[in-house]
Image (cartoon, rainbow, N blue to C red):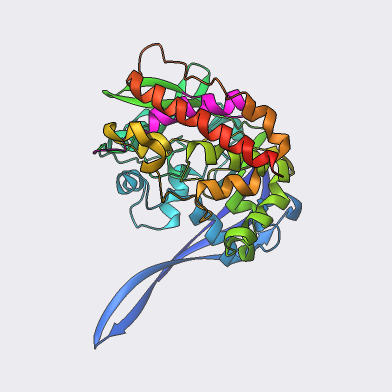
């Protein structure tokens, strides 16, 4: 017995492809026991406007690649409260429930998936101009239980990252509220890291997302505004790379990234990360701004997601010798941060590094780390900038 339903993949109100999702039962036999399981597959795929397919499907759009693309839009397994988030909409743990409730919306682009029998219009449903479901905000941030029974407007099903977070409508703006991890002897300072390290990037003259700090549900969280829109989307570097390039390591991977991101932009990002000891610059948290009309690359996206930095690797008694406490820390590209600095620092970086010679953190009006933390890490940043200048002068 099988069940089949047809959908349109749309970019705003333009139908890009038509396909069916078929759920059927299959029987497996193991050690003489029969086990019935449900599978779901894409059938009847018809490409209507090939040039407007999502970037990842441009080279190959098959039932298999489309199935993977839809699954990738679903909240990842490592995100906080992932089970609670998915349980709000999923009855059979498959794509049909997820799509019927959420329509596969994302704040990264303007694609969505519409049941063929529905007359939904973009203006009435899209995330950019319609208010979010507030119950889903609470599920995403606090892990409460909630079951949706009809279409809901929320970006939570397609938001990546492991920390607790939620998107909120704040006046006319869309903002991401993100918590810190649990604090032990060290750690638990990601929200502060976002706020303070954006100041380093700004002082260097880099285009970056600005962060604020707020109290939300009895804890301090970082808050930033959405940098995409109905016209401009975000494509992570993971999505920019093809399947073979994603398997590359270290220098080969960096070369592939550089071709897309640009030599100077990549060097700027790598220098910034080497100053702040960002150990979490993975392929999902940097990338390109793209035209939502045709997926054309516009420019590198502003720098964001800098919370897992030096602030999180120190205990109070290590502030007197920060370099020693950070020995052994490496980037996601398997480089020490001094190696990363040596590879990417050039004479062109000296002016932006000179801007850090007298760097001090600007305090938040309400929420701050103790003065000895801010003073100690500001001094560390100044010394790292001097090291980078010395390296650049030798080239």
Q: Is residue 125 magenta?
A: no
Name the one closer to the observer, 391 or 368.
Answer: 391
Of all residues, the one furthest to the bottom in this rendering is: 32
Using the image, determine if residue 384 lies above or below residue 358: below
Q: Position of residue 184 (x, y in %)?
A: 24, 39
In the image, the segment drawn in magenta is 185-211
Q: At 63% from the left edge and 46% from the top edge, which residue is drawn?
A: 10
Q: Is residue 251 left or right of residue 171?
A: right
Residue 166 occupies which quadrant of the picture? top left
Picture coordinates of residue 95 (x, y %)? 45, 56
Between 307 and 298, which is closer to the camera in this rendering? 307
Count numbered badges in the picture. 0
Residue 255 quadrant: bottom right
Magenta stretch holds residue 195: yes
Q: Residue at x 36, y 27 (%)?
A: 221
Q: In the displayed structure, would residue 266 be above or below residue 242?
A: above
Locate the C terminus and report the quarter of the image it occupies.
top right
The image quadrant where one finds the N terminus is bottom left
* Between 2 and 316, the one nearer to me in the picture: 316
Residue 306 horizontal/vertical position (percent): 48, 36
Residue located at (38% from left, 53% from top): 77
Examine the rendering and report whether any part of residue 256 can be seen: yes
Q: Is residue 130 visible?
A: no
Name the residue rendered at 67%, 61% in the picture. Answer: 46
Location of residue 226 in the rendering, given as x and y in whole percent from the top left corner:
54, 29
> Is residue 246 rendered to the left or right of residue 150?
right
């Amino acid at each position: 017995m099988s069940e089949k339903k047809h959908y349109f993949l749309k970019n705003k109100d333009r139908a890009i492809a038509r396909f069916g999702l078929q759920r059927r039962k299959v029987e497996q036999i193991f050690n003489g026991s029969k086990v019935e399981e449900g599978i779901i597959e894409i059938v009847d795929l018809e490409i209507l406007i090939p040039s407007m397919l999502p970037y990842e499907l441009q080279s190959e759009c098959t039932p298999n690649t489309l199935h993977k693309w839809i699954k990738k839009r679903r909240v990842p397994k490592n995100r906080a409260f992932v089970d609670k988030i998915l349980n709000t909409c999923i009855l059979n743990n498959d794509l049909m429930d997820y799509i019927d409730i959420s329509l596969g919306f994302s704040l990264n682009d303007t694609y969505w998936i519409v049941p063929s029998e529905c007359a939904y219009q973009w203006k009435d449903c899209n995330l950019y101009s319609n208010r979010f479901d507030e119950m889903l905000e609470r599920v995403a941030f606090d892990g409460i239980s909630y079951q949706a029974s009809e279409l809901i407007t929320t970006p939570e099903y397609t938001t990546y990252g492991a920390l607790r977070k939620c998107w909120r409508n704040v006046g006319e703006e869309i903002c991401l509220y993100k918590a810190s991890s649990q604090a032990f002897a060290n750690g638990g300072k990601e929200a502060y890291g976002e706020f303070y390290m954006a100041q380093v990037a700004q002082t260097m003259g880099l285009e970056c997302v600005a962060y604020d700090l707020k109290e939300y549900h009895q804890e301090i969280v970082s808050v930033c505004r959405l940098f995409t829109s109905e016209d401009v989307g975000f494509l992570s570097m993971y999505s920019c790379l093809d399947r073979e390039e994603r398997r590359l390591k270290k220098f080969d991977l960096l070369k592939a990234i550089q071709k897309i991101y640009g030599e100077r932009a990549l060097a700027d990002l790598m220098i910034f990360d080497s100053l702040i000891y960002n150990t979490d610059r993975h392929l999902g948290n940097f990338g390109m701004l793209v035209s939502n009309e045709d997926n054309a690359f516009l420019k590198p996206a502003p720098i964001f997601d800098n919370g897992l930095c030096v602030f999180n690797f120190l205990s109070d008694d290590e502030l007197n010798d920060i370099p020693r406490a950070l020995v052994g820390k490496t980037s996601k590209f398997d480089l020490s941060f001094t190696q990363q600095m040596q590879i990417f620092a050039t004479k062109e970086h000296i002016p932006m590094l000179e801007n850090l010679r007298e760097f001090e953190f600007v305090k938040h009006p309400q929420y701050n780390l103790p003065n000895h933390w801010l003073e100690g890490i500001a001094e560390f940043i100044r010394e790292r900038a001097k090291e980078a200048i010395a390296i650049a002068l030798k080239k």
